[in-house]
Amino acid sequence: MTIGQERLERRMARGCEFLGSDVAILGGAMSWVSERNLVAAISNAGGFGVIACGAMTPELLDAEIAGTKALTGKPFGVNLITMHPQLFDLIAVCAKHDVGHVVLAGGLPPAGSLEAIKANGAKLICFAPALALAKKLIRSGVDALVIEGMEAGGHIGPVSTSVLAQEILPAVAADVPVFVAGGIGRGEAIAGYLDMGAAGVQLGTRFVCASESIAHANFKKAFIRASARDAVASVQIDARLPVIPVRALKNASTELFTAKQREVAQALDEGKVEMAEAQLQIEHYWAGALRRAVIDGDVEHGSLMAGQSVGMVSKEEPVADIIATLMAEAAHALEKRAA
């Protein structure tokens, strides 16, 4: 083992122990993409796959967890969205299958959800978009955090990964394992965040074009062709509709979303919908648009959610090769620092 590999192993030890994996790399939960095939492939390659529950019903999640277990004996997690109307039923499904790690995304855990997840012995991972929130989550009993910068794909916050890492890691990395996400495409960046105190990283975009990913060939082609500047954040057009920005590759769908917001805002104006219903309509728009792109291959009118690291996705390759490359780059970076 080289000095670099030994250093990398030492820096990742805490994250690996927490996840029960060989390398401290979480798969980012991407709706329609992070299903049994990709999740199992990531876990089988030594990483930690995470099922994206998204808008799934409890029955669908039940089948997805069972399907993933049929493909891997390694640990994997489930990502649940806090605003899901059946959140507690989904938590019960995870408990039924003895899922060891639940990732809660989309805001603060609703009352009772944290206790419900931990009651069965599962470890709870939450997203912390700011230091104050990170501290609050730790006080409430969360087991680990993901800090995700605006470079990420899908729903994003306003602060970059490097700034969040500098702000949050020195303050809380000693208390709980912290995984850094957003814009990570090479091992040198992984080494850098581990050096800053991260327990590991989370990558989504880098795994979309894995051979094991069921994403449509057109979807993968769009990723391979794209550069970092093609992954743009959606624009909010009405202050009353607090739309969380979404980062995706620019296409006709980008304009369609602006039109959808106008339509919903007008319905609000005319009193045809309540605010909660208006926001739900927008969430449903994204779910449908993403499915059109990932599953049906409609890359013009579907949503091509992608992080800015998309420019580093250059070919379709097996998950094991992606992870091996990242690990080799990270070890090499740490080796050079030792010189």
Image (cartoon, grey):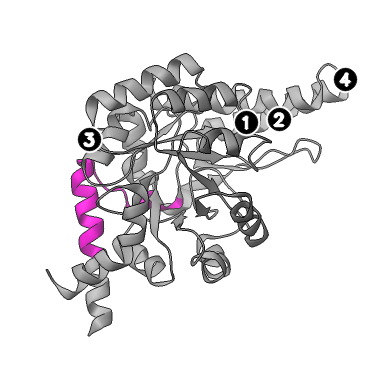
Q: Is residue 261 visible?
A: yes
Q: Position of residue 20 (x, y in %)?
A: 31, 47
CA gap, disc 1 and disc 4:
20 Å
Q: Which mark is residue 270?
A: 4
* Residue 146: percent from left, percent from top: 50, 52
Q: Secondary structure at mark 1?
A: helix
Residue at the spot of label 1:
257
Q: What residue is disc 2 on? A: 261
Badge 2 or badge 4: first in the primary sequence: 2
Which residue is located at x 56 percent, y 65 percent?
168
Label 3, on which residue?
211
Query: Quick check: is 40 in the magenta stretch?
Result: no
Quick one: label 1, few (<14), some, or many (20+) residues within 10 Å? many
Circle 2: residue type = Gln
Dot 4 amino acid type: Glu
Residue, x 27% and y 73% (percent of image)?
334
- Farthest bottom residue in view: 339
In 3D space, how far apart are the residues under numbered discs 2 and 1 (Cα atoms)? 6 Å
Please report the bounds of the magenta region as a residue range.
308-329
Residues at marks 2 and 1 touching, judged by CB atoms closer than 8 Å: yes
Q: How many dots with numbers? A: 4
